[in-house]
Image: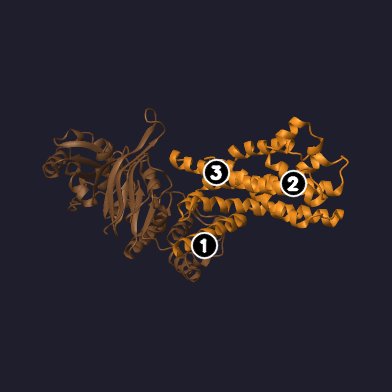
Chain colours: A brown, B orange
């Protein structure tokens, strides 16, 4: 069997049919064995609701979920044995030590007694917590709690791991280390279902991505294929010497520019045809006696695709964040 | 068949795991100490000081109070707290039945109640020289009472909320109400017929009567009826808890 998750017409309505909120609207998708599947969507799109239904925490209003062939509505016990869950909040027992948290979870999932200590030690070492094994989790940093929470979710070696927003609020180092852990777990054969609104996270980790918007799947494909389908969000990024504001006032008027967005000390011009825009841009610089210090053409980023699909304004958010890195096609920096 | 035996063994072990973890995590929490451990003693002293009360009679009353209050305080505190910090999802997502989880939670309340009532019992034996008329009946009464009132508390704990205060207050209010109609402060024999009829609706009446049998050697109701009612109510109170959990799963709370 190649499908780890099969979802048919999955629907969740909160409240009464006439006045309630339709959080998830007839979703259909599959997750294949051994993949990292990204579930990407803005806040309130229905990601967490879907994940809670997939992990038996929430009853669907309608539809069918199969986990490794087990129908969750009839056979949840066998499905639950194969699932690990890392919710958005690191749900560790702060009054217990890291070691006791792991031993509790191992016991809860009926990991054989002789294997518990061995497995807990392996995980604590892998997650860099071995030295802190006897420290109560209340003294842990957010990143350490997150790692402990993930360790607790995989101590029974689940075939399928659900991760809900694993990295928000963490420093860059913790984020990198959690990404590495996710890749490593996946390399060991664990299928990963990753819910996130961090586009770069999905871009970095996922083999396939489903973009959910208003409770419906708007697109589902590999990140690169999604980007390829949205060529109209290509852009040219230019930086001039001196103050940007006064030198870029006429850029939006150039033929072929759809949107103009300030990105740090650069200006990003969205266009459907970068090759046609480039000579106009150079001509603009020459006619205004401007010195170009960098000029790049950019392919559509996953964020552009995401915003296009979810109805956001392309380039309007996060344009100075570390996560906003459109795919660079040909580094055309020139002076 | 072997599969089912294995499953039952697993579920039993999981209930035990949940109970042991909860005991370790929550026994020193202020909410537990206040509502679970100290409240029965406050209640006892509030209504017993300066009243002519024999040591044995006082001990029977205190035992019923501690079993009742401590066991009933656990569910309304622990479950909403766990819902708030997200650890309850870990338990709900684990491969065990909801009944197993609830039995584990029931066992926590029962354990705390048994421990606190043992403190009360030791105090009665050591400081007041009380003699227990029927020790076996006392053990059965404390055990069954603890489980029965723990499942009563679980009903409130199962209300889908993340704020313990939302259910602790109504639960305390109900328990106070039951206290006054259940023959704890006014013996059943001194009640008017109508009041006594109402008292028979409360499981605490049977726990108190059982303590009277065990400590004083006499009660108003047949002790077997007391034991049966406590056992029956322990099972009965699990149903609304199960229903409320299923409801929370549908409502998404």
Please provide percent x and percent y for residue B163.
56, 40
Q: Quadrant of the N terminus of chain B?
A: bottom left
Q: Is residue A177 left or right of residue B70?
A: left
Q: Earlier in the sequence, mark 1 or mark 2?
A: 1
**Quadrant assignment, res A267:** top left
SS at badge 3: helix
Q: How far apart, in angstroms, are the residues tagged by discs 1 and 2?
A: 36 Å
**Can you see residue A216?**
yes
Residue toward you, B220 or B27: B220
Q: Are marks 1 and 2 in contact (CB under 8 Å)?
A: no
Residue at 50% in and 61% down: B10
Q: Earlier in the sequence, mark 3 or mark 1?
A: 1
Q: How far apart, in angstroms, are the residues tagged by discs 3 and 1?
A: 22 Å
SS at badge 2: loop
Q: Is residue A311 left or right of residue B64?
A: left
Q: Which residue is mark 3?
A: B239
Q: Nearer the viewer, mark 3 or mark 2?
A: 2
Q: Which residue is mark 1?
A: B9
Residue B222, disc: 2
Residue B34, disc: none
Q: Earlier in the sequence, mark 3 or mark 2?
A: 2
Q: How many numbered marks have been drawn onto this rendered protein structure?
A: 3
Q: How far apart, in angstroms, are the residues tagged by discs 3 and 2?
A: 27 Å
Q: Chain of mark 3?
A: B
């Amino acid at each position: 069997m190649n499908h780890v998750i099969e979802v048919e017409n999955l629907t969740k309505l909160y409240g009464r049919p006439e006045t309630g909120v339709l959080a998830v609207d007839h979703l259909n998708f599959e997750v294949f064995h051994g993949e990292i599947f990204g579930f990407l969507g803005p806040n309130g799109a229905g990601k967490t609701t879907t994940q809670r239904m997939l992990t038996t925490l929430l009853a669907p209003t309608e539809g069918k979920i199969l986990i490794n062939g087990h129908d969750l509505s009839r056979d949840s016990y066998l499905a639950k044995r194969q699932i690990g869950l890392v919710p958005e909040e690191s749900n560790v027992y702060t009054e217990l030590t890291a070691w006791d948290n792991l031993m509790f979870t191992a016991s809860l999932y009926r990991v054989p007694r002789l294997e518990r200590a061995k497995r807990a030690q392996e995980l604590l070492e892998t997650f860099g917590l071995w030295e802190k094994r006897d420290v109560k989790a209340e003294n842990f940093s957010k990143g350490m709690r997150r790692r402990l929470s993930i360790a607790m979710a995989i101590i029974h070696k689940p075939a399928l791991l659900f991760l809900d927003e694993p990295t928000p609020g963490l420093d860059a180092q913790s984020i990198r280390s959690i990404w590495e852990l996710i890749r490593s777990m996946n390399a060991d054969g664990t299928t990963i279902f990753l819910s996130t609104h961090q586009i770069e996270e999905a871009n970095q980790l996922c083999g396939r991505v489903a973009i959910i918007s208003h409770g419906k799947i708007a697109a589902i494909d590999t990140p690169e294929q999604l980007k390829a389908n949205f060529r109209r969000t290509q852009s040219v990024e230019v930086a001039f010497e001196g103050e940007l504001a006064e030198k870029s006032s006429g850029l939006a008027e150039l033929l072929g520019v759809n949107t103009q967005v300030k990105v740090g000390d650069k200006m990003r011009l969205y266009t459907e045809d970068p090759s046609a825009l480039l000579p106009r841009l150079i001509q603009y610089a020459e006619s205004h006696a401007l010195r170009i210090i960098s000029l790049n053409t950019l392919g559509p980023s996953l964020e552009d695709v995401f915003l296009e699909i979810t109805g956001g304004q392309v380039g309007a958010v996060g344009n100075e964040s570390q996560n906003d890195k459109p795919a660079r096609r040909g580094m055309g920096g020139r002076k | 068949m072997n599969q089912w035996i294995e499953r039952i063994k697993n579920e039993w072990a999981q209930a035990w795991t949940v109970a042991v973890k909860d005991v370790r995590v929550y026994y020193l929490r202020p909410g537990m100490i206040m509502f679970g451990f100290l409240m029965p003693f406050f209640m006892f002293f509030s209504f017993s000081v300066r009243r002519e009360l024999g040591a044995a009679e006082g001990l029977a009353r205190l035992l019923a109070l501690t079993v009742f209050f401590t066991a009933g305080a656990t569910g309304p505190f622990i479950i909403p707290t766990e819902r708030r910090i997200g650890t309850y999802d870990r338990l709900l997502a684990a491969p065990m039945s909801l009944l197993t989880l609830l039995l584990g939670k029931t066992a926590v309340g029962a354990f705390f109640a048994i421990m606190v009532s043992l403190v009360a019992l030791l105090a009665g034996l050591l400081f007041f020289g009380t003699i227990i008329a029927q020790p076996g009946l006392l053990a059965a009464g404390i055990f069954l009472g603890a489980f029965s009132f723990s499942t009563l508390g679980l009903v409130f704990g199962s209300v889908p909320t993340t704020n313990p205060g939302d259910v602790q207050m109504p639960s305390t209010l109900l328990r106070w109400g039951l206290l006054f109609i259940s023959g704890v402060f006014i013996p059943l024999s001194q009640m008017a017929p109508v009041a006594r009829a109402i008292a028979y609706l409360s499981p605490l009446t049977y726990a108190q009567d059982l303590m009277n049998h065990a400590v004083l050697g006499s009660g108003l109701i047949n002790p077997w009826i007391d034991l049966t009612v406590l056992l029956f109510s322990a099972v009965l109170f699990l149903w609304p808890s199960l229903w409320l959990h299923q409801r929370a799963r549908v409502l998404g709370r």
